[in-house]
Image (cartoon, rainbow, N blue to C red):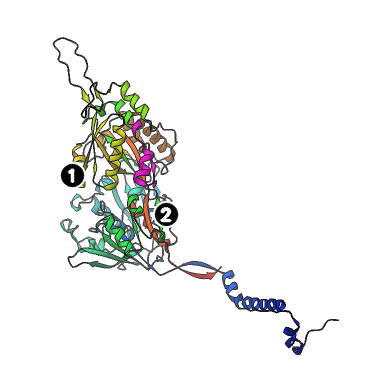
Amino acid sequence: MSRVPTKKQLRHLPKVLSQKERRLMMILFWVAVISILSLPVTSYIHFTKSVPDDGGSMVEGLIGTPKHINPLLSQGNDADGDLVSLIFPGLVKYAGNGKINGDLAESYHISDDGLVYTFVLRRDLLWHDGHALTADDVIFTIFTVQNADYGSSQRILWQGIEVSKIDSLTVAFKLKNKYAQFIGNATLGILPKHIWENIKPVNFGLSEFNLKPVGSGPYKFSKIRRDTFGNIKSFELAAFDKHHAGRPHVSKLTFKFYPSEADLVEGYENNEIDGFSSISASGLSSIRFLGQLKLEKLSLPRYFAAFFNQNHSKPLADKSVRMALSYATDKNGLVEKILSGNGVVVDSPMMPGIIDLPDDTEKYSFDLELAKKTLEDAGWKYPVSVSAEGSFREKAAPTPKTKNEKQGESVKLEIRLTTSDWPELITAAEQIKKQWEAVGVRVRVEILPLPELQQAIKAREYDALLFGEVLALDPDPFSFWHSSQKRDPGLNLALYDSKDADKLLEDARQTLDRSARLSKYDDFQKIIVKDIPAIFLYSPDYLYAQPSKIKGNDTKIISIPSDRFNTVSNWYIETKRVRK
């Protein structure tokens, strides 16, 4: 029968054990001690979970300077737009997956005829100064944006729309005609009536509230810093404790402003900022310490294309030339060369990955030999005597039908390609020039500063225009391709004119059923691709470099750059443990 060893026997135990046995005993002793000591920690981890906590801050660098942190005036300035998105919510907003969700509105209803949109506001809405946000603020904002004296570029979206107050929390919008994409208009930020109602239109853009805004968003104005010359250097926002969706976790957001991408990159490398937005692929490749960032590649419904002005160029009026140029354009090469692979090839005005359309539209795949043959078959030949000036194709004038008729001059295959002085577009223009000249087309690249380019666009003074267009997540390409938009202020940059395309665009924007609407857009894009009014090139990813410490950002698709903040209330830096 075994007995438990006495204390005296245990004291003599080391003497009877071998060195190996003593070492094993020591290991077992410390394992037992550590297990006992770690038991509370193990139990704590087992019965609790990590959740986001409030606290922390982020400093983001932006290119540009804020001028009007006002949802009615912020268009055209990304710095303004970014701050507006954090301070001034709309009735609805785009979620991180591109779908529309309520924001200030807890619900909305569309009438059966598609003409009346009714929004019901949340009951707990407050302005940053403590005033209640009601239907009166919504009515005031829409009346203001509709008044031409206030100079809002958003006015065109609200013309002809009647707005009425049902009660203190309910507003209704009545449209003259059905417009399937109207719900996107309701993302417009709402202004506080009690702040702005006594400010005259002439002073609307000059008010101090444009730089010391009072909104109702997840973040409120805290501090603005200027240099000795009065230039704005940084803008600080604080979490709004009484935000209707709850206090955002990150306590403070600071934005620092830089005049150029090079200055922005230098600011990051000097530890002035934690992250930055809207960096080009070339700028990204030059950054040191990139491993400290979390690079978000967001889908943005924008594309770049070479738009053909057939009224301004005899060669481009020939469809064979436009087709040959399509075959001669190496789009995949452009994506790799210009975007370092951070983008996708585009073959039509309807964005891939943004809306679900069949992938059966005709494509003009890169084929130099087919491009050359297309030109040859259409009569565009190299001159017999090749010289420095004669190394490009031309088309002989028709032979005179009578003896008295004079021989006309041949038409040279020469195109002026106009674009902006943005580095990526300059590189793109140079690459396209090489590709087109490889099949015998003389290309003269014209680089214009933005103000001059805007004037050229207004006057439609270009042969081919290398430029970009931004759609919405529920796109309405009417303003870009309908024949009524051929002249300024319309945005039909190719001066495209097709009765069939016009009819589809008109019908689509009045078709509320999404599947039926997409079917019309599919027919529309097939017509566009067949007529070749432009060569659709690529869609760059929106590159957002966030600090690795930021968690909870699941945004994948954005409508405009500032939409990257639409899920900001879910972001966090700090964590805590709570019971499961």
| Residue found 29% across the figure and 50% down from its top | 163
* Disc 1 target residue: 452
Q: Residue furthest bottom?
A: 8
Say if 25 sits above or below 393 in the image. Answer: below
* Cα–Cα gap, marks 1 and 2: 36 Å
The answer to whether residue 333 is magenta is yes
Does residue 262 appear in the picture of this structure?
yes
Mark identifier at residue 555: 2
| Relative image position of residue 57 (x, y in whole percent) | 37, 67
Local SS, label 1: helix
Magenta residues, start to end: 326-354
Say if 108 sits above or below 197 in the image. Answer: above
The label nearer to you, 1 versus 2, is 1
Location of residue 534 (image quadrant): top left
Does residue 350 appear in the picture of this structure?
no
Q: Toward the viewer: 539 or 395? A: 395
